Image (cartoon, rainbow, N blue to C red):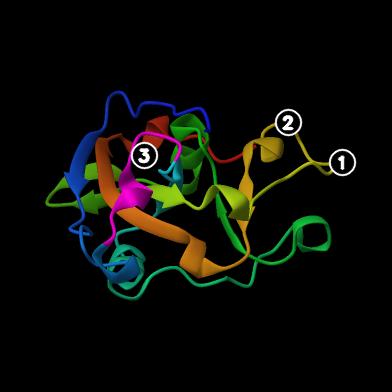
């Protein structure tokens, strides 16, 4: 399917999702043609519990809605997603939090708007939140002074 960018330098914590979806069918987690694509979504420690407990929802900020429709923004590139996770203090350390996702391949709407910055053309928009599932929480230490805002 889709190219997978390894999250090198991040500590991964698994989210217990086996048997939770599709009447217990876990084929969406497979690494073959039946598996869903891997993507990433930068978040905050405040946003993390809601996403993990109730899933994604379509937010208000929809820069490319005219092209792709409204949806949840994610990217197959950890280096892009990290810019959407401003470092926050967690147990006295400055950390970033990024969710590792699986996305139904047929639901992926890449940003192709010619006026989009090159950085923005690395986004996927997923219109239906049921087509995107968090299955890992990635954390890394990063001092706030080293954080770079999205382009």
Residue at figure coordinates x 44%, y 34% from the top left: 78
Give the CA separation, mark 1 to mark 2.
Answer: 9 Å
What mark, if any, has residue 118 been given in the picture? 2
Q: 10 Å neighbourhood of mark 1: few (<14), some, or many (≥20)? A: few
Task: Depth check: give the residue in front, 106 or 88.
Answer: 106
Nearer-N-terminus badge (3/2)? 2
- Pointer 1 and pointer 2: residues touching (CB < 8 Å)? no
What mark, if any, has residue 130 been given in the picture? none
| Residues drawn in magenta | 25-33
| Image position of 141 (left or right of 66) | left
Give the CA separation, mark 3 to mark 2.
Answer: 25 Å
Query: In this view of the protein, can residue 140 be seen by the observer?
Result: yes
Residue at figure coordinates x 49%, y 47% from the top left: 84
Residue 54 in picture, x, y percent from top left: 34, 76
Q: In this figure, which residue is indicated by the disc labeled 3? A: 144
Task: Depth check: give the residue in front, 116 or 96.
Answer: 116
| Image position of 33 (left or right of 134) | right
Q: In this figure, which residue is indicated by the disc labeled 1? A: 115
Figure check: 31 above or below 23? above
Q: Secondary structure at mark 2?
A: loop
Q: Is residue 126 magenta?
A: no
Q: 10 Å neighbourhood of mark 3: few (<14), some, or many (≥20)? A: some
Q: Secondary structure at mark 1?
A: loop
Q: Quadrant of residue 32?
A: top left
Eye-nearest disc, 3 or 2: 2
Query: In this view of the protein, can residue 97 be seen by the observer?
Result: no
The main secondary structure of the magenta stretch is loop
Furthest residue in direction bottom, as rendered? 54
Residue 86 in picture, x, y percent from top left: 41, 48
Residue at figure coordinates x 40%, y 30% from the top left: 146
Residue 40 in picture, x, y percent from top left: 44, 44
């Amino acid at each position: 399917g889709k190219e997978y960018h390894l999250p090198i330098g991040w500590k991964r914590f698994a989210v217990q999702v086996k048997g939770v979806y599709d009447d217990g069918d876990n084929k969406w987690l497979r690494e073959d043609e039946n598996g869903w694509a891997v993507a990433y979504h930068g978040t905050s420690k405040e946003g993390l519990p809601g996403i993990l407990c109730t899933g994604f929802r379509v937010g208000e900020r929809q820069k490319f809605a005219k092209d792709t429709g409204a949806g949840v923004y994610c990217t197959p590139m950890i280096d892009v997603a990290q810019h959407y996770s401003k470092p926050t203090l967690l147990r006295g350390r400055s950390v970033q939090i990024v969710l590792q996702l699986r996305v139904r391949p047929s639901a992926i709407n890449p940003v192709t708007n010619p006026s989009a910055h090159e950085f923005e053309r690395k986004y996927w928009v997923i219109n239906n939140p049921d087509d995107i599932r968090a299955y890992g929480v990635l954390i890394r230490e990063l001092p706030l002074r080293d954080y770079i805002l999205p382009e």
